[in-house]
Image: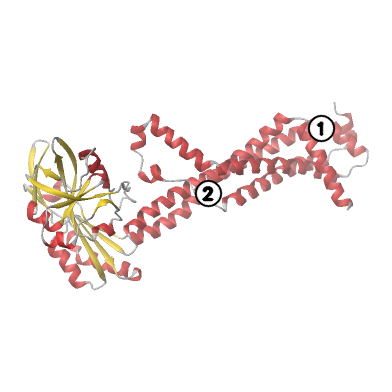
């Protein structure tokens, strides 16, 4: 009972000492508060960015392998008028015939085109694919329907509009049943469906190009082949040239996740003859996902170390203040020692004060840390309002991420704050306890 009473009295005395100098105490608490809040905020932002990146990779599908056609540099294409590159239909069929691990395959061809309805024209991307593309790209119908197997087999002039294209071409009308014109083909396509908005995805680690789904118009791949042929001629910068590209991309869904990496190696071996030109890239989302998870740990440790510096600075602030307090209270310490106070009592009192400052700073920092996600979103929205052009240039991973509080960061940050405060308070406490009572009483 006497032990508890001693600590209670020491705590009361420590609180009174801190209240004698409220401004000094608040500034000391501020250092710990900033440190704890920084740990929670930075880890939350890091976790939010990491989760958003992983979400975008997961949208590609852990069981998918994506074979993309890439336009090589001009020197690799030669001097011909028509640039021939990328994955062709023969290679695509060869992969399907020789790799039984492939359960589904979605070929894609993309061409930039102008879409027109009456006097309104919109530039966008004409995408030719199969009905399976709807599931692969994680699209969602807003009204009407997506392309069907019947549309594909019969080469129908049907199209499905992305939300962005539909809102510009039909701001006040129902697009379903209307016909849009492709001036370059002089051909009309009937609108059978409109998709819900889907935000653009960021390029992931340089291995996958960014995709903007807001300007797409989807038609059956068979119709595209029939209407456009395989060679596309366009005038760019005053020069006239063409591109011979049969498939821009093929998404191959493997029957088992365990077979993805081995199948990817076989695909790369089958397309090895493209290595010299560098016009084909094999993207494995499963590999990207594993890399993202590994990078997450390194990123979190790095962010934690940066925030930990703030806690270290806060601890130095506590030691600095307590050393000044020892000098200021030299006569008080001398009187207590002369009245019989032991060194342990002096040490206990100063440690109580430093721990109290650390605990208060930690608790306030935790409260501020939980407000981090809300503050981050408000600041981001404010920047969008006042600097829309600069914000538009940021990666979509940052623009769309929401900070996620890392549960472990709260007890870790609080524990480190108390530990730092205690460790940095030991030296001033020891210095105060070892004072010579006679010399302390003479101090003015």
Kindly identify which residue carries mark 1.
329
In this view, which residue lies farthest toward the right?
339
Number of other residues with Cα within 10 Å of mark 1, as a class: few under 14, some 14 to 19, many 20 or more: some
Above or below — where is 339 with respect to 416?
above
Q: Is residue 336 in sight in this rendering?
A: yes
Give the quarter of the image for residue 166: top left
Q: Position of residue 407 (x, y in %)?
A: 56, 53
Tell me, yes or no, if residue 71 can be seen here: no
Q: Earlier in the sequence, mark 1 or mark 2?
A: 1
- Left or right side of 398 for 328: right
Q: Position of residue 27 (x, y in %)?
A: 66, 32
Tag 1 and tag 2, C-beta contact below 8 Å: no
Mark number displayed over residue 189: none
Which of the two marks, 1 or 2, is nearer to us in this view?
2
Colour scheme in use? secondary structure
SS for dot 1: loop
Please tell me whether residue 247 is drawn above or below residue 121 in the rendered image: below
As helix, strand or loop, the secondary structure at mark 2 comes to loop
Between 288 and 374, the one nearer to me in the picture: 374
Of residues 380 and 321, the one drawn nearer to the viewer in this rendering: 380
Q: What is the quadrant of residue 36 in the picture?
A: top right
* Real-space CA distance between mark 1 and mark 2, rounded to the nearest whole angstrom: 42 Å
- Which residue is identified by label 2? 405
Name the residue at 26% across, 45% down: 163
Residue at 22% in and 66% down: 269
> What residue is drawn where x is 80% and y is 35%?
16
Task: Indicate the position of residue 171 as horizontal and vertical percent values.
Answer: 24, 38
Compared across the picture, whether 110 is left or right of 358 comes to left
Q: Residue furthest top?
A: 444
Q: Position of residue 408 (x, y in %)?
A: 57, 53
Looking at the image, residue 328 lies above or below residue 102: above
């Amino acid at each position: 009972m006497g032990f508890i009473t001693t600590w209670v009295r020491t705590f009361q005395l420590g609180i009174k000492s801190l209240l004698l100098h409220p401004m000094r105490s608040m500034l000391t608490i501020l250092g710990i508060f900033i440190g704890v809040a920084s740990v929670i905020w930075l880890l939350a932002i890091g976790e939010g960015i990491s989760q958003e990146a992983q979400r975008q990779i997961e949208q590609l599908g852990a069981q998918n392998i994506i074979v993309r056609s890439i336009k090589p540099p001009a020197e690799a294409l030669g001097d011909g008028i028509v640039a021939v590159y990328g994955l062709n239909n023969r290679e695509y069929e060869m992969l399907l015939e020789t790799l039984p691990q492939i359960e589904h395959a979605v070929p894609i061809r993309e061409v930039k085109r102008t879409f027109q309805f009456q006097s309104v024209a919109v530039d966008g991307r004409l995408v030719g694919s199969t009905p399976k593309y709807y599931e692969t790209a994680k699209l969602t119908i807003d009204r009407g329907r997506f392309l069907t197997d019947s549309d594909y087999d019969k080469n129908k002039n049907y199209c499905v509009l992305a939300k962005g294209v539909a809102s510009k071409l039909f701001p006040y009308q129902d697009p379903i049943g209307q016909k849009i014109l492709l001036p370059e083909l002089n051909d009309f396509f009937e609108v059978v469906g409109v998709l819900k908005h889907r935000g653009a995805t960021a390029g992931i680690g340089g291995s996958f190009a960014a995709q903007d789904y807001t300007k797409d118009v989807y038609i059956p791949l068979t119709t595209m082949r029939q209407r456009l042929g395989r060679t596309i001629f366009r005038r760019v910068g005053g020069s006239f040239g063409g591109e011979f590209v049969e498939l821009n991309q093929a998404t191959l869904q493997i029957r088992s996740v365990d077979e993805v990496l081995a199948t990817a190696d076989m695909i790369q071996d089958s397309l090895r003859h493209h290595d010299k030109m560098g016009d084909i890239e094999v993207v494995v989302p499963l590999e990207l996902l594993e890399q993202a998870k590994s990078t997450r740990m390194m990123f979190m440790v790095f962010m934690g170390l940066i925030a930990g510096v703030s806690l270290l600075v806060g601890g130095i602030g506590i030691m600095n203040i307590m050393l000044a307090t020892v000098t200021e209270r030299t006569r008080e310490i001398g009187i207590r020692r002369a009245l019989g106070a032991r060194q342990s009592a002096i040490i206990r009192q100063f440690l109580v004060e430093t721990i109290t400052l650390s605990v208060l700073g930690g608790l306030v920092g935790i409260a501020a840390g939980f407000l981090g996600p809300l503050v981050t979103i408000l600041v981001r929205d404010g920047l969008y309002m006042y600097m829309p052009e600069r914000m538009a240039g940021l990666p979509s991973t940052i623009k769309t991420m929401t900070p996620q509080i890392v549960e472990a960061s709260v007890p870790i940050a609080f524990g480190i704050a108390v530990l730092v405060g205690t460790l940095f308070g030991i030296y001033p406490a020891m210095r105060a306890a070892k004072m010579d009572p006679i010399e302390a009483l003479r101090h003015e």
